[in-house]
Image: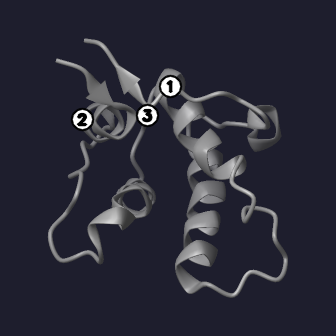
Amino acid sequence: MPKSLFHRVADEACPPAILGRPGCGPPDYFPEVLLNDLVESDAWLDLELKRPFLALWVNDESFDDPDLDDPIEILTNSDARKFAAMDPVVDLESLRGMKVKLVYDD
């Protein structure tokens, strides 16, 4: 059965994360909650998944917006930078323009 990038990240992170943790905002915020959980737990993730996962944020138009005023986006962009700096380190600039596959066949 195919798995989404988010499911693979949650499953393969060490320690594993819970995707769609109950009580954490609207369901459409699950990627942001997942990213925050990875940062808060100091999770390790293989580069094969870490790079495309972070590319989702780097390639969002709001990532470099200095006038951003949405607290969720500000926190998420900060979390993306923190997660990139965690081992294994990812150069965010190298992810610019990266095409991301959201569904993987197992």
- Figure quadrant of residue 91: top right
What type is the residue that disc 3 sits on? Leu
First in sequence: mark 2 or mark 3? 2
Viewer-nearest residue: 90 or 7: 7
Q: Which element is circle 2 on?
A: helix
Q: Secondary structure at mark 1?
A: loop
Q: Earlier in the sequence, mark 2 or mark 1?
A: 2
- Determine crowd level at label 3: few under 14, some 14-19, many 20+ residues with C-alpha closer than 10 A: many
> For mark 3, what is the residue?
45
Q: In the image, residue 45 lies at what x, y percent?
A: 43, 34
* Horizontal side of residue 53 vs 27, given as left or right: right
> Label 2 to label 3, Cα distance in Å?
10 Å
Q: Amino acid at mark 2?
A: Asp
- Which is nearer the eye, 38 or 93? 93
Q: Look at discs 2 and 3 and give the one toward the viewer.
A: 2
Alpha-carbon span between mark 1 and mark 3: 17 Å
Label number found at residue 84: none
**Toward which corner of the image does residue 78 lie, by quadrant?**
bottom right
Q: Given contact means CB atoms under 8 Å apart, are the residues at marks 1 and 3 in contact?
A: no
Secondary structure of the residue carrying tag 3 is loop
Circle 1: residue type: Lys
Which quarter of the image is occupied by the C terminus? top left
Labels 2, 1: front one? 1
Q: Nearer the viewer, mark 1 or mark 3?
A: 1
Give the crowd class for mark 1: few <14, some 14-19, many >=20 residues within 10 Å.
few
Q: Residue at x 30, y 31 (%)?
A: 12
Question: Which residue is label 2 attached to?
Answer: 11
Extreme-top residue of the structure? 106
Q: Which residue carries the number 1 mark?
A: 101
Residue 49 place in picture, x, y as percent:
47, 28
Quadrant of res 15: top left
